[in-house]
Image: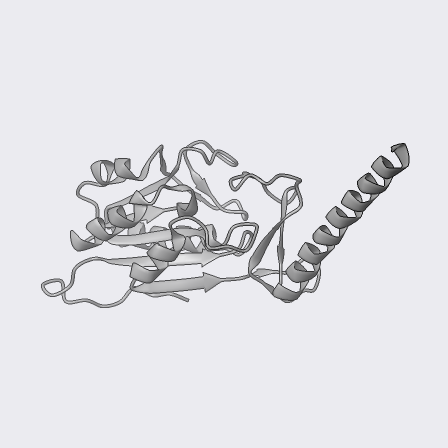
Amino acid sequence: MFLENTVNQKEQFGWIEVICGSMFSGKTEELIRRLKRAQFARQRVEIFKPAVDVRYDEENVVSHDSNEIRSTPVPAAANIPILADNCDVVGIDEAQFFDDEIVKVCNDLANRGVRVIVAGLDMDFKGNPFGPMPALMATAEYVTKVHAVCTRTGNLAHYSYRKAKSEDLVLLGETEEYEPLSRAAYYKAMLREKINKLDVKDSEDLSSKKKD
């Protein structure tokens, strides 16, 4: 469990915390927990999320366990510093959906003395680093990687396998579109997809040859 560090305010700037992992791993739950602790400590807190994410609520940040906290949807990372004036703590959910400017925004806030807490997917559905998350993790003082439970093996999961037939990088969805998988289960699922594509291609070639 993450606990805030004790600091000498005269010698300490702010800092960046990143909470990352696959879908259904509890990233937003942990973000909300830390932000509510800050609110309980009577710190000035602002929370932001990308305006594109309206899966649960247009304004609130909501976890899979239905915990929620008020937030401000913003269309771009550049909007955050303007709205986060005079804050002690800034929370940012679904950071992978922001543009690369989010990295500079978070570092500028931390350099102003703000505690910045960011949550987001570290990998996309293809298993590649997602958007600005690698740079955020590299510049953060604290990185917490959380894991889901693999729906096929029961082991720790850190891949977000897409069940929906779409190649779009951004596809908002829940259990109907995604499932968390372990490395072994993800590898088998991706291998099965490749085999199925080959089978379809071979059958199409065979059909065209018969017509010829």
- Give the mark count: 0
Q: Where is residue 36 in the image (x, y as percent from the top left)?
A: 36, 51
x and y, in percent, of residue 195 in the image: 75, 53
Quadrant where the N terminus is found in the figure: bottom left
The residue lying toward the viewer, choosing from 209 and 199, is 209
Residue drawn at (69%, 56%) of the image: 189
Q: State the residue in front, 13 or 211.
A: 211
* Residue at point 30%, 50% (across, down): 103
Q: Indicate the quadrant where residue 14 lies.
A: bottom left
Q: Where is residue 38 in the image (x, y as percent from the top left)?
A: 30, 53
Residue for point 17% across, 54% down: 111
Residue drawn where x is 46% and y is 36% of the image: 53
Choose top left, top right, bottom left or bottom right for residue 143.
bottom left
Q: Quadrant of the C terminus?
A: top right
Seen in the image, is 38 located left or right of residue 165? left
Question: Eyeballing the image, is 180 above or below 45?
Answer: below
Q: In this view, does 47 lie above or below 156?
A: above
Please identify the residue farthest to the left as the structure is shown: 10
Q: Nearer the viewer, residue 196 or 19?
A: 196
Q: Which colour scheme is used?
A: one colour
Percent coordinates x, y for residue 97 in the rendering:
42, 42
Compared with residue 50, is residue 30 higher up or lower down, i.e. above or below?
below
* The one of 187 and 89 positioned closer to us in this rendering: 187
Q: Is residue 77 left or right of residue 204?
A: left
Left or right: 83 with respect to 121?
Answer: left
As drawn, the residue found furthest toward the right would be 210
